[in-house]
Amino acid sequence: MNIAIIGTGNVGGALAKTWAKQGHSIRLGVRDLAQFKGKELLEHAGIQAFPITEAVAKAEVILLATPAPMAASAAQSLGDTTGKIIIDAMNIVMGRGPEGYTNTAEAILANTATREVVKCFNTTGFNNMENPQYGDQLLDMFMAGGSDESKAVVRQLAIEAGFATCYDVGGPEQYGLMEQFALFWINLAMFRGQGRDIGFKLLRR
């Protein structure tokens, strides 16, 4: 699968490496090919860099992992996204987000042609995307979006990233809930002293 990644920092970089190892073709979309954050990712097989619209043009899936205030402008920079799946891995933290929107997925939908927006890979730290294994258990991932077909693709990508599964928490009305869930992890990890090496697992009996 051709996957475009816009935002080559911690989250984008972790998933780029993981998905490339799974045989996907990773197309980093960057503004300056000569110099960009995460340029060392090009040392990994299966990862290349392109201008943003070129990266998107040949991709079936687009991961948006930019800072949340850039969500609207990043979405506008993608070019034609008709029929493509966009994974929103961003969160508004401490009020810093795209102006006029209550969550980043709303900003994406308002500024792209696609309706296939799935919010995922936003509820835990990048370290858990690099390694979601805790002892003999794998962490779970969570997602929200309006299309069962798109969510099936994202679930498979989460499993290929090493998560046990990816639970569907609902449709677009749950985008905000997904960001609140992310803030719960951030609060525990960063502000309550638990550290980044914590994660969520759904248990049942």
Image (spheres, grey):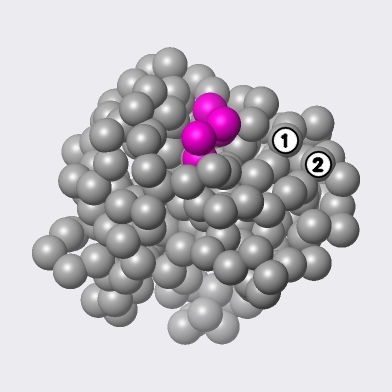
**Secondary structure found at label 1:** strand
Which sits in the foreground, 146 or 1? 1
Residue 78 appears in the rendering: yes
SS majority, magenta: loop
Q: How crowded is mark 1: few (under 14 residues within 10 Å), some or many (20 or more)?
A: some
Q: How many labels does the image show?
A: 2
Horizontal side of 104 relative to 45 (left or right) equals left
The residue drawn where x is 65% and y is 64% is: 33
Which sits in the foreground, 70 or 167? 70
Measured along the vertical axis of the image, is residue 70 above or below residue 104?
below
In the image, which residues are magenta?
Answer: 56-60
- For badge 1, the amino acid type reads Ser
Horizontal side of 82 relative to 196 (left or right) equals left
Residue at the outermost top position: 149
State the image coordinates of residue 145 (x, y, percent, origin top left).
33, 32
Quadrant hosting residue 23: top right
State the image coordinates of residue 115 (x, y, percent, origin top left).
28, 30
State the image coordinates of residue 36 (x, y, percent, origin top left).
64, 71
Per the image, the residue denoted by label 1 is 25
Horizontal side of 58 relative to 75 (left or right) equals right
The residue drawn where x is 32% and y is 70% is: 69
The residue drawn where x is 29% and y is 76% is: 96
Lower sequence index among marks 2 and 1:
1
Measured along the vertical axis of the image, is residue 153 above or below residue 133?
above
Quadrant hosting residue 173: top left
Q: Do the residues labelled 2 and 1 touch (CB within 8 Å)?
A: yes
Per the image, the residue denoted by label 2 is 46
Which numbered tag is attached to residue 195? Answer: none
Which sits in the foreground, 68 or 156? 68
- For badge 2, the amino acid type reads Gly
